[in-house]
Image (spheres, rainbow, N blue to C red):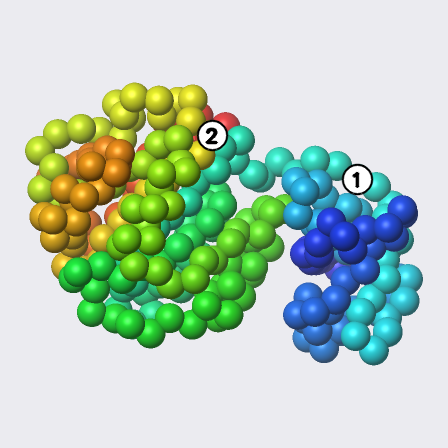
Amino acid sequence: MEIRRFFADASDVCGDEVTIGGDEFVHMTKVLRHKPGYKIVVCPGDGSELDCTLTSIGADSALARIDGRRRGAAELPYRVTLFQALPKGDKLSYIVQKCVELGAARIVPFLSERTEETKFNRPRMERVAIEACKQCGRCVRCEVGELTDFDGVLSRIADAELAIMPYEHALDGRIGDVPGLKEAKDIALIIGSEGGFAPGEVERAIAAGAKTVTLGERILRCETAGLVALAIVDYERGELGK
């Protein structure tokens, strides 16, 4: 039987026991039908993985005995935040799923000058992110931020060591050539919507410290650009093909 992965908080760990509650408890008991005696892996959000055995199931939480602890191997040694201009339709769920697989620590949707979509279902995107984390073996949940505007993006990239903005009209500049890429611990990627960025937005981002780069001669779709940019960062940092 497949050993399933569940997320908890560090505060849920007490000695050699851990409590699983909330949506994870519902999924465990109502969907997967787990019972006492089942083996599970619990990730308390501190980078560790706990090999556990379910000992009891209550009305709104379950208790598991911790049989072993180890460090998770699937997390990146640096933090990447993807700022994604809100795309039309259901493209964001694809972006969230794939960027989680590539190791994004946080995904923040935003409204830009050329954004046409305005609807954003954060709880749904959080569920997509959690399921993607489980599927690819991550031990820390990828955060999905609240919808913000372009000013919010500019204020937040000030906290990053490095901010990179792929731009379809950039004439040169590869991600791999951005100074500091190999050493940065906190990287921000800024990706536009279907209509790309307005020139004024690019100028403001550069003034705020962002580095514009090209992703090649072909103009990529908004649901492709973020994945490519994140994959290039991972490759340049030696995190792909280990």
Q: Do we see residue 15 in this rendering?
A: yes
- Tag 1 residue: 69
Q: Is residue 221 left or right of residue 54?
A: left
Name the residue rendered at 16%, 62% in the picture: 114
Which marked residue is nearer to the observer: mark 2 or mark 1?
Answer: 2
Q: Are marks 2 and 1 in contact (CB under 8 Å)?
A: no
Looking at marks 2 and 1 on the same chain, the residue that comes earlier in the sequence is marked by 1
**Where in the figure is residue 30, as x and y percent of width and height?**
72, 77
Question: Residue 123's spot in the image, x, y percent?
Answer: 50, 70
Circle 1 Cα neighbour tier, 10 Å, few/some/many (<14 / 14–19 / ≥20): some
- Choose between 63 and 106: the one closer to the eye: 106
**Secondary structure found at label 1:** strand
Asked if residue 135 can be seen in this view, the reply is: no
Name the residue rendered at 41%, 45% in the picture: 81
Q: Identify the image quadrant of residue 175.
A: top left
Quadrant housing the N terminus:
bottom right
Which amino acid type is shown beneath numbered disc 1?
Arg
Q: Residue at x 60, y 55 (%)?
A: 134
Q: Which residue occupies 32% across, 50% down?
A: 153
Looking at the image, residue 147 sits to the left or right of residue 47; the answer is left
Q: How many marks?
A: 2
Instruction: Find the distance from the CA under tag 2 to the CA under tag 1.
Output: 26 Å
When asked about the image quadrant of residue 157, the answer is top left
Q: Is residue 128 left or right of residue 46?
A: left
- The image position of residue 164, as x and y in percent, is 28, 37
Q: Which residue is mark 2?
A: 185
- Residue 33, compared with residue 99, is above or below; it is below
Q: Is residue 155 above or below residue 221?
A: above
Where disc 2 sits, the SS reads loop
- Residue 142 in picture, x, y percent from top left: 52, 51
**Other residues around mark 2 within 10 Å, as few (<14) / some (14–19) / many (≥20):** some
- Amino acid type for the residue under numbered disc 2: Lys
